[in-house]
Image (cartoon, rainbow, N blue to C red):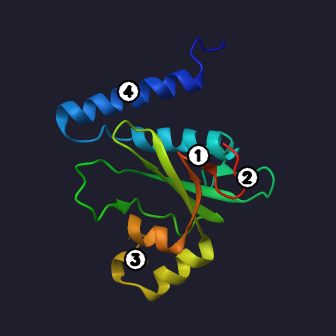
Amino acid sequence: MPTPYAPDKLIAQARSLAAEYRRALGKPLPGVSSEIAEHDAIRLLGLEPRPAGEAGGWDARDPRTGERFQIKSRLIADDSRGGERIGQLKLNQSWDAVLLVLMDEDYQPQEIWCARRDDLLEYIDSGSARARRGAMSVARFRILGELVWDAVGGRAEDGED
C-alpha cells in the first residue's frame, strides 16, 4: 500500500520538528540529523541509497562511478563553541569515501564535504588513539576532504544546483 506522504514532505516535517525540539530543549533530537543528512546528500548529489536489507558500511552509491559513501552529519549552530566532532567511521566496513553534511540550526544543508578512504586511513594510522578509533573533528575532516556542494553554488565539480 503506497504511503500518502512523499519522502521530501516527511523530511521537511522532520527538519522542522528537530529545529523546534533543539530550540525548546537546547539539545538535538537523537537520530534525526543523520536521516535528514542522508536524504539531502542523496538528493543533492544524485546518489542512490543502499538497498534496504543489504549489508555494508555504506549509505549511498554514486550510480555514475559506483563509489560507495558513508554519510555523516553535523549541526553547526550559531551558538556552537567549535570543536565539533563527526561520528565514528566504520573502519572495518567496505566503503570508498565519507560525505559530511553540515547543517544550520534549521537542519538545512549548508555544505557537503567528501573525504576519500585512503586519505582518512592515512590520517587515522598516523594519529592519536582517538583518531585510530575513527573519530575526528569537523575541522580535520575539512582539511582531509574537499567541498563538493554548498548552499550558495550547488555542486562544486560541475557548478550545477
Amino acid type, callout 3: Ala
Tell me: 24 left or right of 20.
left
Mark 2 residue element: loop
Q: Which of disc 3 and disc 2 is earlier in sequence?
A: 2
Residue behind mark 1: 41
Image x and y of residue 89, in percent: 48, 64
Residue behind mark 3: 131
Q: Which of disc 3 and disc 1 is earlier in sequence?
A: 1
Residue behind mark 4: 16
Q: Which of disc 2 and disc 1 is earlier in sequence?
A: 1
Nearer the observer: mark 2 or 3; the answer is 2
Cα separation, mark 4 vs mark 2, equals: 28 Å
Viewport quadrant of the C terminus: top right
Cα separation, mark 1 vs mark 2, equals: 11 Å
Q: Which residue is drawn at 47% across and 68% down?
A: 142
Viewport quadrant of the N terminus: top right
Locate residue 139: give its quadrant: bottom left
- Contact between marks 1 and 4 (CB within 8 A): the answer is no
Image x and y of residue 143, in percent: 48, 74
Amino acid type, callout 1: Ala
Residue 49 in sight here: yes
**Mark 1 Cα within 10 Å, few/some/many (few <14, many 20+)?**
many
Mark 4 residue element: helix
Mark 1 residue element: helix
